[in-house]
Amino acid sequence: MTTLQKKRWVIKCSIMAEYFTETLISLLFRLIPVRIKLSQIGLAYRESRLLFLAVKLNLADLIAKRNIDVDDLAKELNIDADNLYPLLRSLVSFGVFIEITPRVFCNNNMSNQLKQSSESGLHQNILTNNDKRSCNLWFEQLDLVFNSTCEVELDHHLVDEPFNQFTYVNLGSKVHLNPFIGVNWALFDLVLDIGNANGQHISDILSISEDMNICIYDNHIATSSAKMFWQCQKTSNTKFNSTIFRLSFEEGEILRSLPRASSHENLYTFVNVFSRLNDKDCLRVLINAQKAIGPFTATIAIIDSVRSERLSSSRAAINDMQLLLDKHIKQRSIEQWTNLISRSDFTITEIIDLASLNKVLVLKHL
């Protein structure tokens, strides 16, 4: 009987090669700890959207075979270089493009496959699979099919706290890693925590030093909410019973004034506060800090994100991108932090690394 099959062995070899590749990937995937694996799957949409944006902007075609500075590329695209740079660094973090020197990029084998002229067809494939209709099928229609459109109740204390949500180091452990263990808290008798009334960081700091007290300073609404929050923590969580009595509260607006220092061993902490302020308001807070410190040599600790000029990890790159998308957050490089603080009467005396993506900028009065 005449068969319509042609090149049977070519087809079989192709199928076998695909099967072997999928089997190898599956075996390697099994080596990843389950907790990390599930976390990666849950956040894979971010990499997909970044790759789609790279194709939509035709970055591979624009870069072509030349090395191009991000500022020149941004001019060609008519977009802000400060927005384009985190995108390119995120793509580099998972193997697309190469940053040969800071802010200068070129294509590699992966990005070359994204060119419109590439025989792989990936350019059109990625555009098609990430268009609005395809995304709606997975993000909206999927919910409708499985009747799962109801709102999910989240722990808003954790969700609203960017320090917990984005910056704690995840080592694949179920144990909470206190990011402040690398700070010598024994030098201080009182921490004046400014503008972040009920964050996880407060209990973390209290758990390190038994001799230190914390004064929480925020506006009326925030402090009222914080008092209720910490009272609930006391009754529902026994680990807080020994530390809750070391908390005190003071109301005020940080753009108007700060609590007065009482000794040279006072520490003013600003956890993720300055990144939510523009430069003008940051300087106003530092002026208020100078007045509040008065004759004492109290210390200021700005605990916030610092955009690295060098790519440290894919997680750091994705974190930079996530912070970029949050319109309320202004991310600064160490050069920008230095320039900002130099306009005040303070100077950076030390930069402390934490077990997180945040850093501690230690400030002293000139």
Image (cartoon, grey):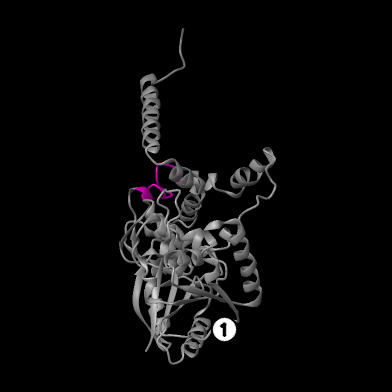
Q: Nearer the viewer, residue 228 or 59?
A: 228
Highlighted magenta segment, given as a residue range:
110-122
Q: Residues within 10 Å of mark 1 (few under 14, many from 20)?
A: some
Q: Nearer the viewer, residue 2 or 324?
A: 324
Where is residue 15? Give x, y as percent.
40, 26
Side of 82 where 228 appears, left or right = right
Kindly indicate the quadrant of the structure image that contains residue 93: bottom left
Q: Nearer the viewer, residue 212 or 174?
A: 212
Q: Secondary structure at mark 1?
A: loop
Point out the residue furthest to the top here: 1
Where is residue 214? Give x, y as percent.
50, 73
- Residue topped by disc 1: 255
- The secondary structure that dominates the magenta segment is loop
On screen, 182 above or below 344? Answer: above
In reply to whether residue 121 is colored magenta, the answer given is yes
Residue 357 visible somewhere in the drawing: no
Name the residue at 48% across, 58% down. Answer: 57
Where is residue 229? Give x, y as percent.
62, 64
Kindly indicate the quadrant of the structure image that contains residue 233: bottom right
The quadrant of the rendering that contains the C terminus is bottom left
Name the residue at 46% across, 7% down. Answer: 1
Q: Nearer the viewer, residue 226 or 353?
A: 226
In reply to whether residue 77 is colored magenta, the answer given is no
Name the residue at 57% across, 70% down. Answer: 197
